[in-house]
Amino acid sequence: MAQAVSSRRLRLLMKQGIVHPMRTRFITDEKGKVLSAVVPIKEYEEMIEDLEDLAAVVERRNEETIPWEQVKKEMDIKVKGLVPS
């Protein structure tokens, strides 16, 4: 279910570069009913990428996880303050 975001929070997210305002134009009929939307191609591509990322998360949500310590050991990583423990 979608969650409402306050306009103050939305402005903060935009200022931080987390959320970007869309420059979408809407095509309406003579009564003002929205029939379609025109989205700049860059924003469309970003939305598609976000949806693909979300789909991957959903597909993998039930997969077994591997503890970080085990990953480091398996990859034989020497950590000297570069990677948090």
Image (tube, grey):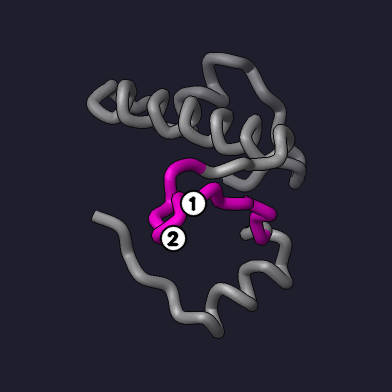
Q: Is residue 55 left or right of residue 51?
A: left
Expressed as whole percent of the image width and height from the top left, the position of residue 46 reads 64, 36
Q: Is residue 53 left or right of residue 3?
A: right
- Name the residue nearer the viewer: 85 or 30: 30
Cβ atoms at labels 1 and 2 below 8 Å apart: yes
Expressed as whole percent of the image width and height from the top left, the position of residue 48 reads 55, 30
Residue 51: give its label: none
Q: Which quadrant of the figure has residue 54?
A: top left
For disc 2, the neighbor class at 10 Å (few under 14, some 14 to 19, many from 20) is few
* Residue at x 23% of width, y 54% of height: 1
Q: What amino acid is labelled 2 in the image?
A: Gly
Q: What amino acid is labelled 1 in the image?
A: Thr
Does residue 53 sit above or below 18 in this rendering? above
Q: Which quadrant of the figure has residue 2?
A: bottom left
Does residue 78 sit above or below 29 in this rendering? above
* Residue at x 56% of width, y 37% of height: 47
* Residue at x 62% of width, y 69% of height: 13
Which residue of the protein is positioned furthest toward the front in this rendering?
30
Residue linked to disc 1? 28
Residue linked to disc 2? 32
Q: Which residues are magenta?
A: 21-36
